[in-house]
Image (cartoon, rainbow, N blue to C red):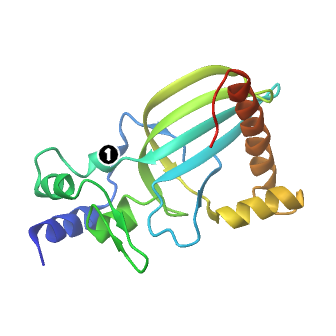
Amino acid sequence: ETYTQKESEIINKNGIKGEDIKGRRDFRGITTFTIDPDDAKDYDDAISIRDMGERKFEIGIHIADVSHYVKNGSSLDREASKRATSVYLVDRVIPMLPETLSNDLCSLLPNKDRLTFSAVFIVDDSGKIHEEWFGKTIIHSKKRFTYDEAQKIIEKNDSQDDFSKELFTLNNIAKKLKKERISKGSVLL
């Protein structure tokens, strides 16, 4: 067992404390979920959506705040710098961080509070951005979707599924934003 594993186990055991939340915008009461491949091991990004009325929506893009736990110059930081990134092989993943962090405290698992960095936008249903905000947040993901699950709900166009309204809204706004990007000369691959 390496020192970084022990360090990460201590961090993971301590979890999120009250002082960790201070100064963060609280998104725990806002509909938030992840959408990842079927075989994903860590969930480092999530999306939130809240209807603001008057055809406007607050959309948040949340990224796990690893820097809260991996302090500059720590053994975890030095080891992560050596690895530079997680490596995905056919049969396994070699994570940049020890699994106790990458698959738990720094993973945006459903039904758990997690610390994040976020980009938050007030967007109308035509895709026009009215406000933007960037900063530290805390979220509570309500569901983990796979790409296939989310796509099936969107294609089925059935409002009986959990979060179908949110997925429809996000998909419609994304289509309008994509169309605008293309009209401005963006090349999509």
Choose between 129 and 18: the one closer to the eye.
129
In this view, 93 is above or below 11: below
Residue bearing mark 1: 20
Name the residue located 61 percent from the left edge and 29 percent from the top edge. 121
Q: Quadrant of residue 158?
A: bottom right
Q: Residue at x 45, y 55 (%)?
A: 44
Say which element carries label 1: helix
Above or below: residue 182 compared with residue 88: above
Q: Which part of the image, by quadrant, shows the C terminus?
A: top right
Q: Amino acid at mark 1?
A: Asp
Specify whether 70 is left or right of 183: left
Viewer-side residue, 184 vs 145: 184
Q: Position of residue 144 (x, y in %)?
A: 60, 64
Left or right side of 103 for 49: right
Task: Classify 126 as above or below 150.
Answer: above
Where does residue 138 sit, x and y in percent of width and height? 45, 45
Q: Position of residue 174 (x, y in %)?
A: 72, 38
Q: Is residue 137 left or right of residue 31?
A: left
- The quarter of the picture where the N terminus appears is bottom left
Depicted 30 relative to depicted 84: above or below:
above
Q: Is any part of residue 29 visible from this angle?
A: no
The residue at 72%/66% (across/down) is 149
Q: Position of residue 119 (x, y in %)?
A: 51, 33
Q: Nearer the viewer, residue 122 or 98?
A: 98
The quadrant where residue 107 appears: bottom left
Q: Residues within 10 Å of mark 1 (few under 14, many from 20)?
A: few
